[in-house]
Amino acid sequence: MKRVASILLILIGIAMLYLGVQNAMLPPILTGIGFFIISWVFWGKNMKS
C-alpha cells in the first residue's frame, strides 16, 4: 500500500514541478519537492518492513 502511495506521490510531484516551472511559480515547485520527500520516506519504510 505504501508503495502505491509513494508512486502516486511521485507522479503528483512531477506534475506540480511541471506546472511550477511552466508558470514560473515557486509554491507548486516547493510542493512537488515535498511530495518527493514524502514518497522517499514511504519507500524507505516499505523496504525495511
Image: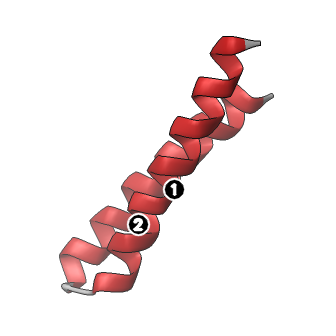
Above or below, 48 against 28 in this view is above
Front disc: 1 or 2: 1
Q: Amino acid at mark 2?
A: Met
Image position, residue 16 (x, y; %): 41, 66
Above or below, 42 against 31 in this view is above
Mark 2 element type? helix
Q: Which residue is mark 1?
A: 35
Mark 1 element type? helix
Of the image marks 1 and 2, the number of the one nearer the N terminus: 2
Above or below, 21 against 3 in this view is below
Q: Residue at x 51, y 37 (%)?
A: 40
Q: Residue at x 59, y 28 (%)?
A: 43
Q: Are marks 1 and 2 in contact (CB under 8 Å)?
A: yes
Image position, residue 11 (x, y; %): 48, 46
Image position, residue 20 (x, y; %): 29, 76
Q: Nearer the viewer, residue 3 or 46?
A: 46
Q: Identify the mark at residue 16; answer none if there is no mark.
A: 2
Q: Quadrant of the N terminus?
A: top right
Q: Residue at x 39, y 77 (%)?
A: 28
Q: Amino acid at mark 1?
A: Phe
Q: Say whether residue 19 is left or right of residue 7.
A: left
Q: CA–CA distance between discs 1 and 2?
A: 9 Å
